[in-house]
Amino acid sequence: MKKKLLFIINTMGRAGAETALIGLLRKLTSMGQYDLSLYTIIPCGELFDRIPEGIHILNQHIKKGSVLSLSGHLRIVREVIYSFFYHFTGLKMFGYMIRNIREQRASGRKLQYDKLLWRLLATGRPGLAETYDLAVAFIEGAATYYLADKVKARHKAAFIHIDYQKAGYSQLMDQDCYHDVERIFVVSREVGEKFISVYPKYQDKVRVFHNLIDRDEIRKKAEEGSGFTDRFDGCRLLTVGRLHYQKGYDIAIQALAKIREDGYHVRWYVIGEGLEKAKLEKLITKFRVEDCFILMGARENPYVYMKQSDVYVHATRFEGKSIAIEEAQILGKAIVASDGIGNDEQIVSGYDGILLTLNVEQLASVLEHLIDHPQLREEYARHALEKKVEFPEELEGMLSMLDEVRDL
């Protein structure tokens, strides 16, 4: 009889963790040894279309549109309202909300109301009746809370994809959701170190599990479609990522304004959507880069644009481990990235890209240097193609949990 595996995730929107989950599900499906199920806290997102055949989707009603669209927002509101009134969860959680808001204010961090809603969304819904051999929360927040409180499984594991502390999580917020989790998989060594700084008592549970990347599929898609159609003959910069403060687009806009002021023929394209769009459009107008900082929105196939770009830029404020960087390396791109968590494990500065301190002046200076030296871009691109992107031993390590004897 096949072992039963359950994966839980917050949404199926087009983002890094969701893309990594698709890669993992494809790999497990190809093995033919497991009965695979998926449960989504907010059953909405474009990547539902990419889920492999044979996966049991446990949500009764899913929406395949963008989480960030109007209908996506309405779906989120619907889920929040349902969770609030389910067994009076919202009223019962009032004290929890107040304590966490006080903690966030006392720490001086930006208030993370969305993180508090993850707990509401996880608590305010029924559990699953099935018992699984292995249940995996593939992302932080609601998925992990739901795993802890609502799922019966012989073995439990959780994934961490971000700088845990900077993302706004805390022990008070989590309510010890990692107590019964046997292994905590982190997507990079530094992500693990940051998580352990919040949870030193769980250090022995932490293992590195790199994102699964389908090299052949990415290269195949890079040859499909026409890509850019604007006939621009200068240097093309590209960033792929949701429009969020974390991604540092405000700094990118100002850097591009300086680069253009210095006389460079360049355009910067951004593939992604998000709640920061209106704010970024105002910045684009303020710094007069309407003709060269292009918000392209979401694209079903970003790889054809990535292949046609001269430099891939990933200048984020904080990160876990960027799938977009790995995809750009697979396509042989010179990469410029900020020297934060995760990025410095993916790029050897001066060998296959450049790492920099994130500020307007340095970002502009580094990009100008690469524009002036196309032979250096070619050298970085060659070295990027050498990067290792497959780690089969890590998948074996996760699946070995199934062989361990543990009763409920």
Image (cartoon, rainbow, N blue to C red):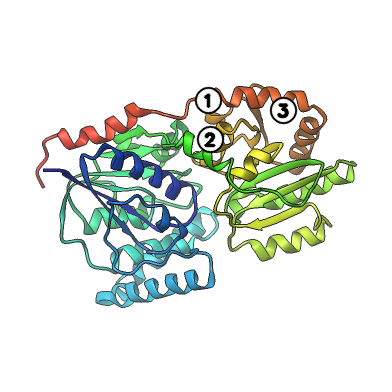
The residue that label 1 is drawn on is: 387
Q: Which mark is residue 377?
A: 3
Q: From the image, which quarter does the N terminus lie in?
A: top left
Could you tell me the amino acid type at mark 3? Arg
Depth check, front residue: 11 or 169: 11
Alpha-carbon span between mark 1 and mark 2: 8 Å
Q: Residue at x 56, y 49 (%)?
A: 301
Q: Mark 2 falls on what kind of element?
A: helix
Q: Mark 1 falls on what kind of element?
A: loop
Q: Position of residue 230 (x, y in %)?
A: 76, 52
Depth check, front residue: 386 or 262: 386
Alpha-carbon span between mark 3 and mark 1: 16 Å
Depth check, front residue: 328 or 370: 328
Q: Earlier in the sequence, mark 1 or mark 2?
A: 2
Q: Earlier in the sequence, mark 3 or mark 1?
A: 3
Q: Position of residue 129 (x, y in %)?
A: 16, 61
Mark 2: few, some, or many residues within 10 Å (few <14, many ≥20)?
A: many
Determine whether, in the image, residue 404 is placed left or right of residue 396.
Answer: left
Task: State which quadrant residue 403 falls in.
Answer: top left
Q: Mark 3 falls on what kind of element?
A: helix
Do callouts 1 and 2 mark residues in contact (Cβ within 8 Å)?
Answer: yes
Q: Is residue 211 above or below residue 260?
A: above
Q: Position of residue 269 (x, y in %)?
A: 70, 49
Mark 1: few, some, or many residues within 10 Å (few <14, many ≥20)?
A: some
Q: Residue at x 57, y 32 (%)?
A: 329
Mark 3: few, some, or many residues within 10 Å (few <14, many ≥20)?
A: many
Could you tell me the amino acid type at mark 2? Glu
The residue that label 2 is drawn on is: 326
Could you tell me the amino acid type at mark 1? Lys
